Amino acid sequence: MFNSISESYDFLNHFLSFGVDFYWRKKTIRKMGKFDPRIILDVATGTGDLAIEARKINPEKIIGIDIAESMLEIARRKIKKRKLNPLISILQGDSENLPFAEHRFDAVMAGFGVRNFEDLDRGLSEIYRVLKNDGRIWVLELSEPGYFPVKQLYRIYFKNITPMIGRVVSKDRSAYSYLPDSVEKFPSGERFLEHLKAAGFTELKRFPSTFGVVTIYCGKK
């Protein structure tokens, strides 16, 4: 599915979020930067926007991994255009079966990808495995607002307008119907913190943003 919408993916992300997605990524990276991670893994990197944003905290190395090759090809083009090839490497692979040794990364991050894990707990366990001791996980993910009238307006926009625009622009009838369904099924908020706890993470925190439309989660190994 993500291969089929790869060429329109970035445009739709920016358009459908009214450009606020740039701010969400910046906020995530600013929070992560306070811990000065040197080696960073970006799981479900997609077209690489979060990995590219992470360069601003001056790590030694960033690796992005995703299973959708067409998305990765766009990421590689953006990285090449910005002359970031020595810093950012892009690999095709399964985020639930990471091809890395234990205790490899200072930070592992994921932007709008964790809810697409086929097995959420397995994916989180893999992230835990490849993190160094005292390393941290950072997850930026869509969530449902809980307050009137934002909750009601959000549902109307997300369930009706978003799929319609997505179908017209991407020419994929299913992809942007999948989007609201995946958000609805994702265990956001305190429920996601419980999954992080089950994977072994401690010092769990969550930071809702933009009336709860997205949430930044973090935990420590």
Image (cartoon, rainbow, N blue to C red):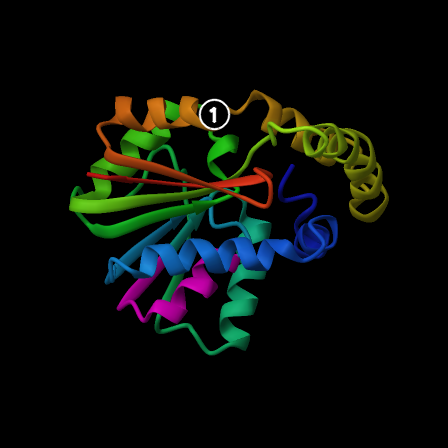
| The quadrant where residue 221 appears | top left
Residue appearing at x 35%, y 74% in the figure: 86
- The picture places residue 136, in percent across and down from the top left corner, at 26, 45
Give the answer, above or below, for where 198 lies relative to 59.
Answer: above
Nearer to the camera, 121 or 89: 121
* Quarter of the N terminus within the rendering: top right
Q: Which residues are magenta?
A: 48-63
Q: Which residue is mark 1?
A: 118
Nearer to the camera, 97 or 214: 214
Instruction: Give the class, few, some or many, for how many residues have Cα within 10 Å of label 1's Cα (few <14, many ≥20).
Output: few
Nearer to the camera, 208 or 41: 208
Give the answer, above or below, for where 130 lies relative to 12.
Answer: above
Give the answer, above or below, for where 114 lies relative to 86.
Answer: above
Residue appearing at x 50%, y 56% in the figure: 25
Q: In terms of secondary structure, where does tag 1 sit?
A: loop
Give the answer, above or below, for where 51 lies relative to 116.
Answer: below
Whether residue 101 sits left or right of residue 156 in the image: it is left
**Does 22 lie within the magenta span?**
no
**Does 53 lie within the magenta span?**
yes
Residue extending farthest left? 133
Residue appearing at x 22%, y 28% in the figure: 200
Residue appearing at x 60%, y 27% in the figure: 146
- The picture places residue 155, in percent across and down from the top left corner, at 73, 29
- The picture places residue 163, in percent across and down from the top left corner, at 78, 35
Whether residue 197 sits left or right of residue 104 in the image: it is right
- Type of amino acid at the residue the image marks with label 1: Glu
